[in-house]
């Protein structure tokens, strides 16, 4: 692990806008970003594509991947499993890509333990009120899940000290510029 390319660990509470920011820089050819597609047991949302957004698998398939040591890290998040396929990431790094893992904090801490040289970035919302507004505005979750995600967000915010960089997503374009500078400096 941790070969040629740089491993980028990208976290932040659910609803903070990680996906929006990512869209703004992931295709910048100078950055050579390869997005690591995770495995999850969560149900597919409208518009999500298997193999693009996630590899959608059953709980049995996920447990098998854990048993076979196929995951670089994994975590349970609000009732579902999420994990990073080891070989997929390794292949991308070996090809010289900077591989970006968009993962929650329990998994991120596992990766940072294994790969201390990884570049770690945590995205924070301008306020918790704004975060709640964004999660609700997405309209993809039930009230129960929204409340669980908000609770989880508070816990995740306590872990930001483990990351090298903390960026506030007030204006996505501005957050994107800061992240692009960080990645360029690390190359
Ligand atoms: P969502 O259900 O909103 O797509 O993702 C929920 C959370 O799981 C997000 O914080 C996302 O970053 C995280 N996540 C996505 N893939 C992985 C993964 O492979 N491992 C871990 N630990 N977290 C992940």
Image (cartoon, helix red, strand yellow):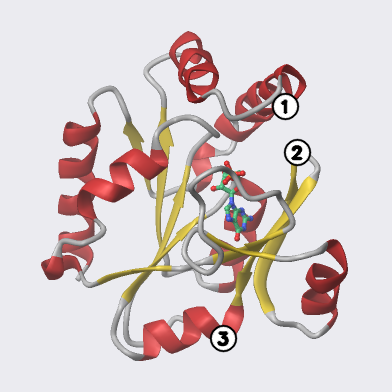
Cα gap from disc 3 to disc 1, whole angstroms: 32 Å
Q: Which residue is mark 1?
A: 145
Which marked residue is nearer to the observer: mark 3 or mark 1? 1
Q: Secondary structure at mark 3?
A: helix
Whether the residues at callouts 3 and 1 have beta carbons within 8 Å, the answer is no
Is ligand 1 less than 8 Å from the beta carbon at label 1? no
Q: Does the Cβ of the disc 2 residue fall within 8 Å of ligand 1?
A: yes
Asked whether disc 1 touches disc 2, contact meaning CB atoms under 8 Å apart, the reply is yes
- Residue drawn 47% across the image and 64% down it: 52
Observer able to see residue 145: yes
Q: Nearer the viewer, residue 118 or 84?
A: 84
Compute the Cα span from label 2 to label 3.
26 Å
Please, is residue 139 above or below residue 58 in the view?
above
Quarter of the figure with the C terminus: bottom left
Q: Is mark 3 within 8 Å of ligand 1?
A: no
- Give the mark nearer the N terminus: 3 vs 1: 3
Q: Residue furthest left?
A: 30
> Which of the pair 9/19 is nearer the observer?
19
Q: Residue at x 84, y 78 (%)?
A: 64
Horizontal and vertical percent position of residue 160: 51, 38
Asked whether disc 2 touches disc 3, contact meaning CB atoms under 8 Å apart, the reply is no
Earlier in the chain: of badge 1 and badge 2, it is: 2
Local SS, label 1 = helix
- Residue at which label 2 appears: 78
Q: Name the disc covering residue 87, or none.
A: 3
Measured along the vertical axis of the image, is residue 21 above or below residue 171?
below
Q: Earlier in the sequence, mark 2 or mark 3?
A: 2
């Amino acid at each position: 692990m941790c070969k040629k390319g740089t491993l980028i660990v990208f976290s932040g509470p659910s609803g903070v806008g990680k996906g929006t920011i990512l869209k703004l820089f992931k295709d910048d050819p100078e950055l050579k970003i390869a997005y690591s597609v995770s495995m999850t047991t969560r149900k597919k949302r409208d518009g999500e594509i298997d193999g693009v957004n996630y590899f959608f698998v059953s709980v049995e398939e996920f447990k098998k991947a854990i048993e076979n040591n196929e995951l670089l890290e994994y975590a349970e998040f609000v009732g579902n499993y999420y994990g990073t396929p080891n070989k997929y990431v390794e292949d991308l790094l070996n090809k010289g890509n900077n591989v970006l893992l968009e993962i929650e904090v329990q998994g991120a801490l596992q990766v940072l333990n294994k790969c201390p040289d990884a570049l770690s970035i945590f995205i924070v919302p301008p306020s918790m009120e704004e975060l709640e507004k964004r999660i609700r505005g997405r309209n993809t979750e039930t009230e129960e899940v929204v409340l669980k995600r908000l609770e989880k967000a508070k816990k995740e915010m306590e872990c930001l000290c483990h990351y090298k960089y903390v960026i506030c997503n007030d204006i996505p374009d501005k957050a994107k510029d800061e992240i692009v500078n960080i990645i360029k400096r690390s190359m």
